[in-house]
């Protein structure tokens, strides 16, 4: 084992070096008062003394933006932006926003709302925060770790690619390896083309928040879940004038690679070529995975990266010693991929922890499998801790991470979920009896059934999204994070069934047919686009016609949120957004020239209709475009009160006669 740790020490040293040179972002920026104007620092100190709050750190990453981290349980970060338009709450020339994903601000912890109100009171009492129109000090450059110095290069994936290529170098001239590479490339290309023909590019995130994720690509900003999404897609801002299209393309390529990964994992686990092909087909035609691969969703990123990690771990199977590079390099590469996944969103951390199970369930003596699985899990854990540990700890200790890591309802809801499975119990018992009876080894068949049932129960109990809490397609997207584990369990269980080649072909045909039937039945409901996604695509088309400037629209009404693909500080991508919210009547938007206005779907909701009517009465407008869309909500309980909603684009010509 001495050689194992020698190799691992070299790999860890390389990882530390790459992290230090490539990743300059921090999930929780360090205190940086010197980065801000002295007037801003003085104001923050005065506010903390008057209101009895504690400012953990103060950052001024842009000339008109200040970020305050407030200590407390839970933590709170507040963005203060100087200028028109932006802000959850407007106080004079300042816009104040709590940083995070809050579906309903009235439902967050009272302590958070209280601290936000205290910051608002400080701004209202003393708006003179700046001198010279800038909050940022020009005396010192931004230090390492500021949000705007964000990493937009996927160094972890590049490191994983280097490790994988190094592991494959000895067999680079092998005819068998070339055949596998060609067949895998054909699978991926075919999947990419098939999904492009069947599914449109479209935002996926519920409650209209897909553009929020793309905004991290086009403008460097703090992201509460970590720097992983920006690292994966941030480099695209140099390659395309439409950032969504670049994100969708890279997402599609990653999703297509999951198909040959599924086939490779099944083959390494002992499945026949026919069965491996059938399982790969199930992944390729799955409507949810297809829809995710044509979107910005972090669920799609997570599923694709976990397929890659599982395939890398599966490649380390065999008779190689644990001290050989053929075992260590793929495992380190898998750890880097899992670390990249962990930096995107915490919702997939549990699914990522199950990836080393592929080594435990592979062929060979159980002691050897157990040893390889334990060693691989330890290596992966150390790699993730070295490359992503600080960011993950920051997320865990933040209010944003608590929204996901606390589960979706505790023990009571877990019991309720088990009760919902009661009607399926007889079918499950019949399937278990069939699998045990058809297995070549009864004890191993029982072991596989127990592992399958245990995995399903674990998934059910640890469900962070929850049955009934979200729309069906969002919950199914969460379950797709466990698709690699599902392929592993299916391959291990079904490889025991056939005792002859004809039986194997029949089994593979049955799996393929079942996959086709399930996808066909589920396709209409799982690929049906909600109104906000259709609206965002319509606005993307309109955006191409608009010059630089500003566009105003209603973004929030009660719990409903709609973010349109207009991005702040993104030159060449159309106008910048002027955000309107119910209850916060906007200042005269014509002071900034001749802005545009979008009548959004939120204007067809009880909470937003009156507000939109007030805005549209206040200004003289010229209608440029109009469409009618079906009313399909993306959140349970947040529907529309009309069967079809109107979305329109206007040019604002000036104030109406009564408001002049």
Image (cartoon, rainbow, N blue to C red):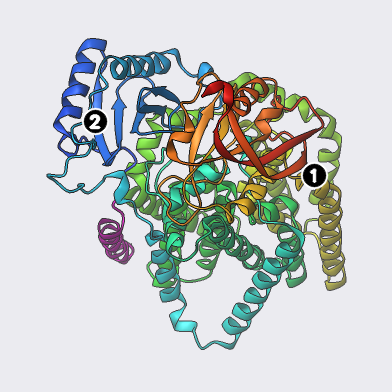
Say which residue appears at 39% left-offset and 55% top-offset.
379
Percent across and percent down for residue 640 are 74, 27
Answer few, some or many: residues within 10 Å of disc 1's Cα (few below 14, many 20 plus, some between 14 and 19): some
Nearest to the observer: residue 391 or residue 252: 252
Nearest to the observer: residue 76 or residue 268: 76
Q: Is residue 196 left or right of residue 84?
A: right
Most common secondary structure along the magenta stretch? helix
What is the spatial separation of the Cα atoms under label 1 and label 2, in whole angstroms? 56 Å
Say which residue appears at 28% left-offset and 64% top-offset.
14
Location of the N terminus (image quadrant): bottom left
Asked if residue 466 lies in the magenta stretch, the reply is no
| Residue 432 circle label | 1
Nearest to the observer: residue 289 or residue 416: 289
Residue 255 quadrant? bottom right
Percent across and percent down for residue 595 are 51, 41
Percent across and percent down for residue 378 are 40, 51
Q: Are marks 1 and 2 in contact (CB under 8 Å)?
A: no
Can residue 373 be seen here? The reply is yes
Percent across and percent down for residue 569 are 40, 48
Residue 9 quadrant? bottom left
Q: Is residue 410 left or right of residue 109?
A: right
The correct choice, above or below, for 621 with respect to 487 in the image is above
Residue position marked by numbered label 2 in the rendering = 57
Q: Which residues are magenta?
A: 1-24
């Amino acid at each position: 084992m001495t050689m194992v740790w020698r190799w691992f020490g070299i790999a860890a040293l390389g990882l530390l070096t790459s992290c230090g040179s490539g990743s300059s972002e921090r999930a929780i920026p360090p205190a940086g008062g010197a980065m801000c104007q002295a007037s801003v620092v003085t104001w923050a100190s005065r506010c903390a003394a008057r209101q009895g709050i504690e400012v953990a750190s103060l950052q001024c990453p842009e000339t008109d933006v200040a970020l305050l981290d407030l200590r407390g349980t839970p933590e709170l970060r507040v963005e203060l932006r100087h200028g028109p338009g932006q802000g959850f709450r407007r106080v004079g020339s300042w816009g104040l926003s709590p940083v995070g994903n809050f579906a309903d601000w009235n439902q967050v912890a009272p302590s958070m709302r209280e601290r936000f109100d205290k910051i608002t009171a400080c701004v209202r009492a003393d708006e003179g925060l700046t001198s010279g129109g800038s909050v940022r000090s020009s005396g010192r450059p931004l230090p390492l770790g500021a949000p705007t110095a964000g990493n937009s290069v996927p160094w972890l994936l590049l490191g994983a690619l280097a490790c994988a290529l190094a592991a494959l170098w000895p067999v680079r001239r092998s005819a068998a390896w070339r055949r596998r590479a060609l067949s895998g490339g054909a699978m991926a290309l075919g999947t990419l083309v098939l999904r492009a023909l069947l599914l449109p590019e479209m935002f996926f995130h519920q409650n209209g928040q897909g553009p929020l994720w793309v905004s991290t690509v086009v403008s460097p900003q703090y992201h509460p879940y970590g720097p992983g999404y920006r690292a994966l897609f941030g480099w695209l801002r140099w390659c395309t004038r439409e950032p969504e299209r670049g994100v969708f393309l890279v997402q599609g390529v990653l999703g297509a690679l999951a198909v040959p990964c599924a086939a490779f994992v099944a083959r390494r686990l002992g499945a026949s070529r026919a069965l491996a092909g059938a399982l790969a087909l199930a992944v390729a035609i799955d409507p949810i995975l297809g829809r995710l691969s044509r979107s910005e969703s972090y669920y799609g990123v997570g599923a694709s990266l976990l397929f890659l990690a599982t395939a890398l771990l599966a490649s380390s199977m065999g008779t190689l010693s644990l001290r050989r590079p053929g075992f260590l390099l793929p495992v380190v590469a898998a750890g880097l991929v899992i670390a990249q996944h962990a930096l995107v969103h915490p919702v997939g951390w549990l699914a990522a922890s199950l990836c080393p199970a592929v080594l435990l369930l592979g062929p060979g003596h159980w002691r050897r499998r157990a040893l390889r699985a334990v060693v691989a899990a330890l290596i992966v854990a150390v790699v993730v801790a070295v490359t992503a540990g600080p960011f993950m700890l920051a997320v865990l200790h933040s209010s944003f991470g608590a929204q996901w890591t606390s589960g979706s309802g505790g023990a009571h809801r877990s019991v309720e979920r088990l009760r919902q499975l009661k009607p399926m119990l007889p079918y499950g018992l019949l399937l278990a009896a069939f699998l045990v009876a058809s297995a070549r080894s009864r004890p191993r068949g029982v072991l596989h059934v127990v592992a399958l049932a245990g995995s399903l129960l674990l998934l059910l109990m640890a469900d962070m999204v929850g049955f009934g809490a979200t729309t069906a397609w969002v919950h199914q997207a969460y379950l797709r994070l466990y698709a690699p584990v599902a392929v592993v369990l299916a391959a291990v269980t079904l490889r025991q069934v056939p005792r002859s080649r004809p039986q194997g072909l029949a089994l593979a045909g049955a799996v393929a047919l079942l996959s086709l039937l399930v996808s066909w039945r589920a396709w209409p409901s799982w690929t049906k686009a909600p109104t906000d996604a259709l609206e965002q695509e319509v606005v993307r088309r309109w955006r191409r016609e608009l010059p630089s400037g500003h566009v105003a629209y209603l973004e929030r009404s009660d719990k409903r949120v709609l973010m349109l693909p207009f991005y702040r500080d993104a030159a060449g991508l159309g106008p910048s957004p002027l955000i309107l919210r119910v209850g916060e009547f906007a200042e005269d938007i014509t002071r900034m020239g001749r802005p545009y206005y979008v009548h959004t779907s939120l204007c067809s909701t009880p909470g937003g209709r009156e507000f939109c009517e007030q805005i549209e009465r206040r200004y003289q407008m010229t209608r440029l475009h109009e469409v009618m869309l079906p009313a399909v909500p993306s959140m349970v309980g947040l529907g529309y009160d009309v069967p079809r909603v109107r979305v329109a684009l206007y040019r604002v010509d000036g104030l109406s006669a009564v408001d002049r």
